[in-house]
Image: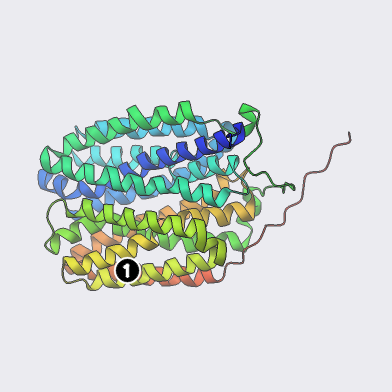
Amino acid sequence: MVETTQQHWGRRITAVAFVSLTGAFGLNLAIGQFIAPLMGSFGWSLAATSAAVAVNMLAWGLFQPVAGRLIDRIGPRAVMTVSAVLMGLAYVALAGVTEFWQFLILFGVVVAVGFAGCSSMPSSVLVARWHTKRRPQALAISSMGINAGQLLLLPLAGVLVAAFSWQAAFLALGAVMLVLVAPAIWFGARNSPADVGVEPEGTPVQVVAAATLREALGDRQFWLISLGFAGCGYSLYLFTTHMPKLALELGGGPNAGGWLMALVAACSAASMWATGQWVAKKWGKRPTLILLHLIRVAAFVVLALAPNVPALVAGVVLFGVSSFPVIPLTTGLVADRFGGTAMGGILGSTWLIHQVFAALGVLAGGVLRDATGNYSTAFASGAVVLVASTVLTWLITEGRFQTALPAAHPA
């Protein structure tokens, strides 16, 4: 079968979103590989480094609505490209830090602003503009870039830190973003199908008006979706920031954290494919999310009680299965309810709430570890928050937000 122009561009945009997520999440999640080396080089405390990562989470969240509004106005292509360049330059600069305030500004603020503009929210908006009926599959495939970033860049960071230095690892990851990811976005993407004279892939017969941000903020379902997603943020970044150090404390080697994150990525990729292609289609997004939240609760219970590395691996597998598939499912709920053509600000607000709780999770992990001498209480707090997310997700009602269609102009 000959591929049409429409199909070509649909696949191309999905691939660009995949590449953007690979670089963005690879760099942002790799920070867990640098915490122990930075603490060893400069004598920084775990609470201090955790606070810097928490600032990153919060700054990322605060900039999400801004990035969303910019995307609504000028399109995702320029926003994502500039943001990828900003992340790359910040990582190159991190190789030269000598003071904590430099690390705080570069990773806590600059990397976060760049990440906000080229990670899940902008990539999801880009994909949603180009796909309608095939949106769930396209979001699931593009979101597997998150897993690719973990599989490729986190172990790479660990290997480079162990074989050379943390400075070399920062430089290498920055170069990946500058040389590979940013050019791929700029030359590979277009803002919308209209830019190349085609229709979105799988355009439905009836086009429904998209909701405004103000309408979304007044909708109970927006808050149920967003606050349910907040538990994902708390637990996700508690895990990704502190699990490498937990692995060390349980007797794992210096590269254990990187390889365990690669295991997370492999499990997540399999789960992402299964949920996007089969489970969510059969059960719906909300029941699938409830199942994933319950699996993650079990993961955090195991992590809180883990006495050794084998038990830790079991918790890592459960977390991997239940981790990143939550993102495309939540994005799909937002797009289904509020429309895919004007959801930059809406989805950005959902991500802001996610990131406020992500910052709390990172900070709580460091503070509770220092206060208690181990990570049991920290990971137990993740299980409690996820139980609340499960209840909120159970209360969600799937369906389109009723917004007034614009008045038709006379012919």
The answer to whether residue 108 is left or right of residue 8 is: left
- SS type, badge 1: helix
397 shown above or below 152 = below
Q: Position of residue 193 (x, y in %)?
A: 62, 33
Q: To which residue does mark 1 refer?
A: 299
Q: Quadrant of the C terminus?
A: top right
* Amino acid marked by disc 1: Ala
Between residues 280 and 297, which one lies in front from this camera angle?
280
202 shown above or below 176 = below
Q: Quadrant of the N terminus?
A: top right
Q: Residue at x 72, y 49 (%)?
A: 208
Residue extending furthest toward the front:
1
80 shown above or below 271 = above
- Quadrant of residue 26 in the image? top left
Q: Position of residue 259 (x, y in %)?
A: 22, 52
Q: Residue at x 27, y 61 (%)?
A: 365
295 shown above or below 404 = below
Q: Position of residue 293 (x, y in %)?
A: 43, 67
Q: Residue at x 44, y 71 (%)?
A: 388
The answer to whether residue 98 is left or right of residue 211 is: left
- Quadrant of residue 240 in the image? bottom left
The answer to whether residue 94 is visible is no
